[in-house]
Each structure stands twice: as C-alpha cells, then as structure tokens.
Amino acid sequence: MANVRSDQLGSEPIGRLLIKQAVPASIGILVMSLNILVDTIFVGNWIGSIAIAAINVVLPVSFFIAALGMAIGIGGSSIISRALGAENKNKALKTFGNQITLTILITVAMVGLGLYFVDSLIPAFGGKGEIFEPAKIYYTIVLYGVPFLALCMMGNTVIRAEGKPRFAMIAMIIPSVGNLVLDYLFIYVFDWGMHGAAWATTAGYLLCFGYIFWFFLSKNSELKISWPHFGLNGGILREIGSLGFVTLSRQAVTSITYLLMNNILFDLGGEAMVAVYAIIGRMLMFALFPVFGVTQGFLPIAGFNYGAEKYARVKESIYTAIKYAALVATLVFVVLMIFPAEIAGLFLSSREGMSATEIETNTFVLEHTPAAMRWVFAATPIIALQLIGAAYFQAIGKAIPALLLTLTRQGFFFIPLILTLPYFFGEIGVWSSFAIADVLATIVTGIYLKREIDRDLNRVAA
C-alpha cells in the first residue's frame, strides 16, 4: 500500500500499480461504507427503524451538495493527472487552487438554499408522516458540516491524482472511525437520539477536513499552491465543469432516484417499505466497495498515461481494471445471494419494551428485505464493465461520452423502469428494475468502449 510518485504512474507494471492504487482506495471506501452501515445499525437498534428511514430521506440532499465537491475534485483531478503526465506542473497547481475556490463558493451557497427550503425538501424526498420530524433534525445539523465534506471529497481525489493512495485512504478512515465512536457516545451514552446521530456525522466531516488540510501543507504533497493559484481561470473552470458535470449529473440522478423510490415505496408500503430501501441503499454503498476501489485506482493511471501518450498502457489498464473489478463483484454477489436475511437482521432492534408499531415495522422489514436484496444485486457480476467504461472517458477528459455512459444506467434505464414496472408488478417491479437497468447499461457501455478502443487506442498505438 505504499504511495507512488506521480511519474511512477507511467512506468510501473499496470497490474502492480493498479493494486497499489486500488487496495488503499478499497480500504478507504470499505471503512467509509462500514461507517454508514454500522451507523445505520446503531440508529436502528438505539433509536428505531423510523430513524433509519429518516436518514435515508435526508441523504439525497446532503449527498448532492457534497457531490459538488466530488464533481469539482474528479473533474480537476483528471486535469491534474494529465498535466503531471505531460510535465505541466503550473497547470496542475492552478487547477488545484481553482478547485478549492469553486468548492467553497458553490457549497456554501447550496447549504444556504438547503436550509431555507428545509420544510419543502424533506416531504418531497419522502419524509412524510412519522418520518418528517426526525428527518428535519438530522438534516438541519448535518447540512452545516456538508461544505467541509465537499472539501474533503474534492481534496481526496487530488491526493489520489498525485499518486498518494495511502493518504487518501487515511482521509476516508478518519471521519468514519470518528463518527462511530461519537455515535456510541452521543446516542447510546448521552441518549441524544437523532441529534446525537447528526452531530456525530458532522464532527466526522470536520475531522476529515483537518487531516486533508494538514496533508496539503505538509511535505507529502507535490502541489504547493500560493494565493495567485486561487484566482479563477475561465479555461480551467470550463474544463473542470465539463468533466465534473459528469459526476454531478450522476449524483443528481441518484438524488432524483431516492426521491422517486422513497415516494413510490411509501405509497406501496408506508414507512416500513422506505426502511427496506434504506437497508438496501446501505448495502449498495457497502457491498460494492472493492469494485469502487478498483475504479478509483484506475482513474489516475489511465489519466496519467493518456496525458503521457502511452496508449498501450492505457489499454492494458482498462482490461486489467475490468478483470479485477469483475472478480471481486462476483464474490460480493455470492455472499449477498446466500445471506440476505442474516444481513437484514443486523439492522433491526430486538430490545425489550418495543412498541407494537415498532415490532410490526421490524417484522415487515425482515420479511421483505431478503427478496428485494436478491433482485437489486442480481446483475452485480457484470457491473465492472459499466463502471470502468464510464470512468475511462472521464479519466482521459472526454466529457460527453463520460456523461452519457454515466447517465445510462440510472437516467436512461432505471428511472423509466421504476416509473413503469411497479404499476404492473407492484413491489417486485421496483426491485427488478435495478437488475434490468444494470444489464442494459452494461451492454451499451461495452459496445461504446470497444468502439473507442478500436478507433483510438489501437490506431494510435499502431
């Protein structure tokens, strides 16, 4: 898990390099996902299943604002990787300075709007009935920390673009561990309920920001920016925007998906059905951590070598990343198909003194989650091609195909399916939409990626 200098991205064997990049990324995503998972287990056991649904309602709004930071980070990091590959250090520094300025300006403005429209946004995202009040508590507190989360997500991608995956991994671990410790103190020991869950999450963001701020001030970073680098540059902003828009669009569609899913499921089965989706959503974040880790590790390798015009290495990195990601995705698939009921049971409380409503809700969730989980993850073994294919175009700076492939699964297939199939097949129509969308998106991505390799990489390499 040693860090590599940026120039080593263009010289080390691809397989070894991908492992060096992907393992720390996977560990970081694993710990972050475990944090989300265990946080949900704590909330479910110590507050209740309605609290799980409340947090699930809030996530799309807070994650969308935080995703602004990730969008700026990934868009800028693609520029930085290619600039370092082309030995253009000044462009890399100017890009990083612009990323910081842009992240602060946009996220602070978005948080202001999010707080102003709080009473409208929560019901729109499914926070109805008993879910509304705990969702509002959690939302209001967490939103104050979201600009720091956005800066963390932006900074983390830049650290990885420098070839320092171990530091990026630590940056992801710190808020996760901090959140879990504070969850125990604030919820279990101090009995602060939803307030405790929200403050634990916000404090985790602040801890992460402190670490990333230290990294860029220390000798570990190659990017030593000064005040002139913070001045916005139109050309760089356009390039960050075009590439970052891909990530932002993906998160925007994800937020729309949460909005639709929460409302559709609430109509089908009330708060309990929303809680089922909350558990499924956590597993989507957690179970696929190694696949996302390989994707994150692949991005700087492809971007650097493309910038250095080492096209044979770019092609090799694509095939190697797909192979590694498909292997781990298949292992995840096997586990989820065998143990869905046991996994669902982890999220539900069995404490004494529960009300009849809580017992009824827990029983419903336990009965409905296993079948839903099998449907949602049915196409997991093939998603590696979909993720790596879309990431490739983003890594090399081709914004339009990256955007289209990123939106293919959720925007072009999944949303139309969940708006249609439930009317004919009810609950099964909702869950089967996940697998159908995965299959269709993978086919489209595979065709497009093969055409690009044949037309671009093979021709240039020859």
Image (spheres, helix red, strand yellow):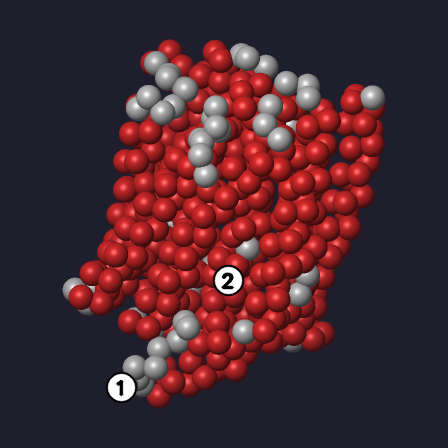
Q: Is residue 242 above or below residue 126?
A: above
Q: At 37% from the left edge and 62% from the top edge, which residue is drawn? A: 38
Disc 1 residue crowd, few under 14, some 14–19, many 20+, Cα 10 Å? few
Report if residue 204 is visible in the image: yes
Residue occupied by mark 1? 353
Q: Secondary structure at mark 2?
A: helix
Q: Is residue 283 above or below residue 401?
A: below
Q: Position of residue 250 (x, y in %)?
A: 58, 44
Q: Is residue 235 above or below residue 330?
A: above
Quarter in which the C terminus is drawn: top right
Q: Nearer the viewer, residue 22 or 356?
A: 22
Q: Position of residue 103 (x, y in %)?
A: 41, 31
Report if residue 234 is visible in the image: no
Q: Position of residue 204 (x, y in %)?
A: 30, 47
Can you name the residue that lies furthest to the left here? Answer: 190
Q: Nearer the viewer, residue 151 or 57?
A: 151
Give the amino acid type for the residue marked by disc 2 in the picture.
Met
**Disc 2 versus disc 1: nearer the observer:** 2
Q: At 62% from the left edge and 66% from the top edge, which residue is drawn? A: 334
Q: Secondary structure at mark 1?
A: loop
The span from disc 2 to disc 1 (Cα, nearest Å) is 28 Å
Q: Which mark is residue 283?
A: 2
Q: Is residue 222 left or right of residue 378?
A: left
Can you name the residue that lies furthest to the bottom here? Answer: 356
Disc 2 residue crowd, few under 14, some 14–19, many 20+, Cα 10 Å? many
Q: At 32% from the left edge and 41% from the top edge, which residue is drawn? A: 208
Q: Which mark is residue 144?
A: none
Q: Position of residue 2 (x, y in %)?
A: 44, 34
Give the amino acid type for the residue marked by disc 1 in the picture.
Gly
Earlier sequence position, callout 2 versus callout 1: 2
